[in-house]
Image: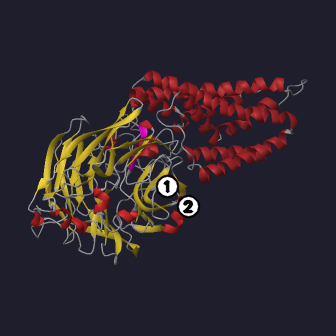
Amino acid sequence: MTSISPWLVLTGLGAFHGVNPAMGWLFAVALGLHRGSRRIVVQSLIPIAIGHAVSIGLVAVVAVLLGLIVDQHVLETGAGIVLLGWAAYQALYGHRHRVRIGMTTGMVGLGLWSFLMATAHGAGLMLVPVVIPLCLSAMPGQQLTAAGSLPIALAAIATHMAAMLAVILVIAVSVYSWFGLSFLRRGWINFDYIWIAALTVTGLILIVR
Amino acid sequence: MATWQPDPSFYPSPRMAAKAPAEKVAYVAAFDPERKIPDAIAVVDVDPASSSYSQIIGQVDMPNAGDELHHFGWNACSSCLCPNAPHPHMERRYLIVPGLRSSRLHIIDTKPDPKNPKIIRVIEPEEIAEKAGYSRLHTIHCGPEGIYVNALGNAEGKAPGGIFLLDPNSFDVLGQWEMDRGPQKLAYDFWWHLGHDTMITSEWGTPDTFENGLVPEILLGSKYGRRLHFWDLHKRKHLQEIDLGEEYQLVFELRPAHNPTKAYGFVGCVISLKDLSASIWTWYRDGDKWGVKKIIEIPAEPADPELLPPVLKGFGAVAPLVTDIDLSMDDRFLYVSCWGTGDMIQYDVSDPFNPKETGRVRIGGIVSRATHPKAKNGALNGGPQMVEISRDGKRVYFTNSLYGPIDPQFYPEGVEGWMVKLDAGDNGGIKFDEKFFVDWPRSHRPHQVRLEGGDCSSDSYCYP
C-alpha cells in the first residue's frame, strides 16, 4: 500500500457500476413508484448493494486464494483471458438470458437479482487488475499469507461498495423525488458498450502487463 | 444492431407515451381470401397534411400465397426500458408478421424508408414446428425475454396451442415458452401485467374447428374456448383458470390496463349461446387470486330473416359479434367493435366495473350496411373489426374483415375491404374523419392495423 491510486480506482469503478441503470438504482426507483414510497426506494438499495457485494466478493476471494498458490504473472494472464472471454460473451449473447425476477419481487429476490446482474456483467472481474496487485504484493520482510491478504481484499470491496452505494443512493432518490424518468428516453446511453470496452481494456492490461 | 441511445419511440410510462407525436403511416395486414395472390403488408398514409392522405402508398408482398396474414407486431418496444431486464439500446424497426394459416413467419424491415418496407428473413413453418412445437401463429408481443409469438395449434395442428420465444436480435426461434401449462389447451390472444408478473391467455379453438369456418355443432355444443388463463410471467407456470361459463363462446382480445400498477383488464366474448349477445368482462386482482366480472352486455338486434345469412336466419336477429376491443393509453376509453351489427362503441371505463357509453358510430353491418361520407357505393359490408388507437388517443383506425373462411358465413356475398378513421374528443365522443376512407383493392381484405412508432396494443410499460 505504497500508493493511494488503487483505492481511487476502486472508488471510481464503484461509481461507474453505480451509475449504470442495469445495476440497480432504476429497479429501486421502479419499485418505489409502484408502491408509492420513497422509503421503498432507499430500502431496495440495501439488497441491491448486498447482491453486488457478494458477487464481486466471491471473485476477489477466488483471485486472492488463487494468488497464494499460483504465480502472480500466470494468474494475471489467466484473469485477462477470462475477462476477454466475458467481454466477447457479453457482446454476442449479453441480451439472451432468462428473466427470473419481476416487479413483484421481495427484498430477497432483489438481492438475488443484483447478484445475478453483477455476476453476468462481470462486475467482479473488472476489479481483478486492481485487487491482485493490492492484495498480493507482500510487504517487505513479510510472507504473503491469506490472513494478510484477505483483510485487504475486504477493504477493497468495502471501498468499492461505499462508492457504489453513495452513487445509487443519490441517483435513485433524486430521480424518484425530483427528476422523473423521462430523461431515460435519450439519456440512457449504452452502458453495455462502455462495459464491454472496460472488460476488454482490463483484460488486455492484465495480459500485457 | 445495438444503438447508443434508446429508440425515441420507447417511453418509460404510458403517461409519457400518450404525448408521443402523431403517426404518419400505418401498416395494415392484407390477405387474399382466395389464397391465389400473395398477402401483403400495406403502408397507408395517415398524415392529414400529405397529398396522399388516406391512400395506400406502399406495399410489401409475401413470398408465397395463402399465408393469411392476420396479426403482427414490433421487434422491440417500450418494455425494453424495464428495470429488471433492461435492453433499451434497440431499434423499433422490424415488423414480425406471421401467417395464421401457413405458420410462416416474416421479418420485415421498416428502415431506412418506412414507406417501402422489405422482407429480410422468412422462417418456414417446419423450423417453427421443430424448434418450438407450434403452428398457426397469431399474436406478437415484444417483452422482457424477447419476442413472444403465440400459436393456435401444436406442430400437428392440434391442441395445445401456446407461446414461443424469438431472439429479438437474430430472430432465431428459441423454443416453447411454457414450462408448466397446467390444464390450458386452447389459445387465442395473450398479454401481460408487467407490474404484476402475470401473463393472461384467452381461447378460440383448434385449427380443424375454424380453418374451414366456424362449425355450428361445435359452437352450439359450447366446445370453442370460453376460458381465461393466468400465468406466472417469469416462472412460465400456469396459475389459474377461469371459465366464463357454458353459454359464453370465443373469448378473444385481451387488453390489460397500460398503467403497470393497475391489476385489471378487459376481454371480449364474441357470442352468448343464450341470446346471441356479446359481452365485455373485467378481470381483476381479488386477494391472491384473479377474478372476472361481466361489465357490458351488448344485445342482439331483431331483424327480418330475409336479410340474414343462413347461419343467423333461424334466430331472426343480428348478433353484435364483438371481435376486437382496444383500450386507450390512459386506460380511460375502451373501443368495442361489433362486427355483426356494424357499431363501433366507445365506453368510458375510468371505473373498470362501471362503464359508461360515451360514443357510437355505425358502418357496414350484416343488415344495416351503413355507409361513409367518402364511400362510393353507399352500402358497405363487413363491419368494424380490428381497431387501433393512436398513442395520444385522438385517432382511432379500423378495418372490416374478420377471417377468410368466416367472412362469408356472416357476409355471404363476400367482404369488400375498407379502412376508416375516427376522431375522438378529449372527454369522449367519436365521429368519422370524412376525409379518411380507404376503399381497399378488391384482391385483398385488410385486417390488423399497426401505427408508426407504436400504438395502444403494441407496447407495455414498467413505470406508472
Task: Please tell me whether residue B362 belongs to the stretch shown in magenta.
Answer: no
Q: Where is residue B304 in the image (x, y as percent from the top left)?
A: 8, 62
Q: Is residue B379 left or right of residue B294?
A: left
Name the residue type under label 2: Lys
| Numbered range of the magenta stretch | B190-195
Quadrant including the C terminus of chain A: top right
The number of discs equals: 2
Task: Please tell me whether residue B194 belongs to the stretch shown in magenta.
Answer: yes
Q: Position of residue B343 (x, y in %)?
A: 16, 54
Please tell me whether mark 2 sits on a helix, a strand or a loop.
helix
Identified at 20% across, 38% down, the residue is: B355
Q: Mark number for residue B131?
A: 2
Q: Mark number for residue B434?
A: none
Name the residue type under label 1: Phe
Quadrant including the N terminus of chain A: top right
Q: Main secondary structure of the magenta part?
A: strand
Q: Position of residue A57 (x, y in %)?
A: 70, 31
Q: Are marks 1 and 2 on the same chain?
A: yes
Q: Is residue B313 left or right of residue B208?
A: left
Marks 1 and 2, the one that precedes in the sequence: 2
In this picture the colour scheme is secondary structure
Q: Is residue B34 left or right of residue A77?
A: left
Chain letter, disc 1 residue: B
* B221 vs B349: above or below: below
**Marks 2 and 1: in contact by CB < 8 Å?**
yes
Identified at 45% across, 67% down, the residue is: B104
